[in-house]
Amino acid sequence: MLTPLTCQILPDELLPAVLKLDLICLGGLWTEAGYRREIDSPNSDLLVLQANKQVIGLGCLWAILDEAHITTLAIHPDYHRQRLGQRLLTQLLQSACLRTLSHATLVVRASNQPALSLYEKFGFRTAGQRKRYYKDGEDALILWRSQLQTPDYQHHLKQLEQECTKTFGKHRYQWLPYVTFGH
């Protein structure tokens, strides 16, 4: 039997599960009030990834002028190495494209090699560094990707999406796309 895998804008009823995931993956980065602000903001796309109706992933972007600022991307540790982060990032960048944003940026721990490899696959490049950015004193890298609206990049996103679909079959997932964007 295949496990249904879905991605959608975060509805209020999934907020408790998102707070648990945030605690597991991000150490309690955002509060309930913080997530509610994101849900209510017309400039924010807060996506949740679910496997069998269980929240296993979380991604958020802010639309600022012509830029998608990716603030959060997290997958539950039990679900790593299954291309779920890749699929969620694809959804975020597709959302940015629907908003006609032309650039994307994010910050990532300098030591987070799996995340850096993922972002590199999407064409992100290091644009700068923030010294001692994290509470533990670790540096952050600022990553940047431009030209989101080009046909070449749109094609690249489709290829990355297809890669995920192939892998999902191996993990017994059935992708049920129904992301809704309120733009």
Image (cartoon, rainbow, N blue to C red):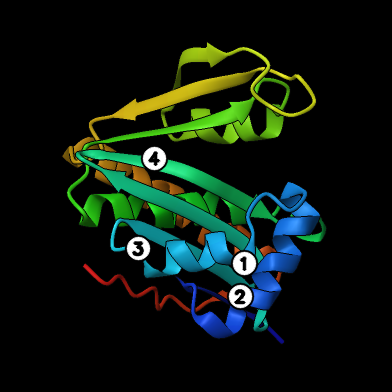
Residue at label 4?
A: 69
Instruction: Determine if residue 78 is in view.
Output: yes
Q: Residue at x 70, y 58 (%)?
A: 22
Residue at label 3?
A: 41
- Which quadrant of the view contains residue 48? bottom right
> Label 2 to label 1, Cα distance in Å?
8 Å
> Label 1 to label 3, Cα distance in Å?
14 Å
Q: Residues within 10 Å of mark 1 (few under 14, many from 20)?
A: few
Which residue is more in the foreground, 83 or 32? 32
- Which quadrant of the view contains residue 49? bottom right
Q: Residue at x 77, y 49 (%)?
A: 27
Q: Secondary structure at mark 2?
A: helix
The earlier-in-sequence mark between 1 and 3 is: 1
Task: Give the percent coordinates (x, y) of residue 177.
Answer: 43, 75
Q: Are marks 2 and 1 in contact (CB under 8 Å)?
A: yes
Q: Residues within 10 Å of mark 3 (few under 14, many from 20)?
A: few
Q: Amino acid at mark 3?
A: Ser
Task: Give the percent coordinates (x, y) of residue 57.
Answer: 63, 62
Judge whether 140 appears above or below 39 on screen: above
Q: Residue at x 67, y 20 (%)?
A: 110
Judge whether 115 appears above or below 42 on screen: above
